[in-house]
Image (tube, grey):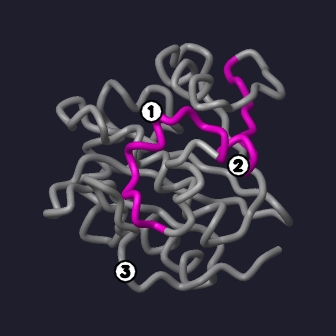
Amino acid sequence: MKKAPILSSPIIGKHISLRLVGVSDAEFIYTLRSDKKAKFLTQTSGGIPAQEQWIESYKKRESAGKEYYFIIQSLEGQPFGTIRIYDFQEDSFCWGSWIIQDDAPSYVAIESALCLYVFGFYTLGFKMARFDVRKANVQVVAFHKRFGARIINEDTLNYYFNLSLEDFKAIPKVFAGFLPANLSYFTNLSKGE
């Protein structure tokens, strides 16, 4: 398994940034995960104190480079949601805990996914992304299919997806426009190469 870096600054996108979660984010995260949209995520219990404890435990895994949990926010710091990358294996990572407020700008979903893929593929050096989506979460299933992700398995509740680095490089140009063109690893994507 690769040794992941310790992040000292947020991942900056075109309109958003991904900053590491802190204990002070527990109330925001608990509120998000208590919303009707969170029905497709693992359920939380125990209120804000339990969320604070979970974050404290997570911060140890973050320090060890085993996972990263982010607040998706505007460049000015307004929080919109969360996204997490974890379960690092030899050449792949898993991602999830992706939830965005209903009133967030429309670009937040696309840009947050792109930023996470760039981080996983280019910063961490993985070749494959893995994730699961509840079958009932029809909009998110459709989003991932448009992005080029492939369903590799399914069970009663979930579809299990893969998206390779090569698949990511071939994403439709319309999606590529959601990242800053001045990023060196993005040059080939923005040209559609």
Query: Which label sits in the foreground, 2 or 1?
Result: 1
Residue 129 badge: 2
Which image quadrant is residue 72 in?
Answer: bottom left
Residue type (three-letter) at the residue carrying disc 2 = Ala
Answer whether labels 1 and 3 touch (C-beta < 8 Å): no
Q: Is residue 160 magenta?
A: yes
Residue sitting at 68 percent across and 19 percent down?
A: 157
Image coordinates for residue 66, horizontal then vertical, percent: 65, 73
Image coordinates for residue 37, horizontal then vertical, percent: 36, 27
Is 115 left or right of 15, judged from the image as shown?
Answer: right
Quadrant housing the N terminus: bottom right
Image coordinates for residue 95, horizontal then vertical, percent: 60, 49
Residue to which mark 1 is pinned: 174
Residue 62 badge: none
Is 13 left or right of 87, judged from the image as shown?
Answer: left
Q: Residues within 10 Å of mark 2 (few under 14, many from 20)?
A: many
Q: Residues within 10 Å of mark 1 (few under 14, many from 20)?
A: few
Query: Which label sits in the foreground, 1 or 3?
Result: 1
Residue type (three-letter) at the residue carrying disc 3 = Ser
Which image quadrant is residue 48 in?
Answer: bottom left
Question: Helix or strand or loop: what does disc 3 sit on?
Answer: loop
The disc, 1 or 3, on the residue closer to the chain's N-terminal end is 3
Q: Along the line of sight, which residue is nearer the eye, 8 or 82?
A: 8
Residue type (three-letter) at the residue carrying disc 1 = Val
Q: Which residues are magenta?
A: 157-183
Which image quadrant is residue 121 in?
Answer: bottom right
The disc, 2 or 3, on the residue closer to the chain's N-terminal end is 3
Residue sitting at 25 percent across and 44 percent down?
A: 31
Residue sitting at 13 percent across and 63 percent down?
A: 76
Answer whether labels 2 and 1 touch (C-beta < 8 Å): no
Question: Helix or strand or loop: what does disc 2 sit on?
Answer: strand
Residue to which mark 3 is pinned: 9
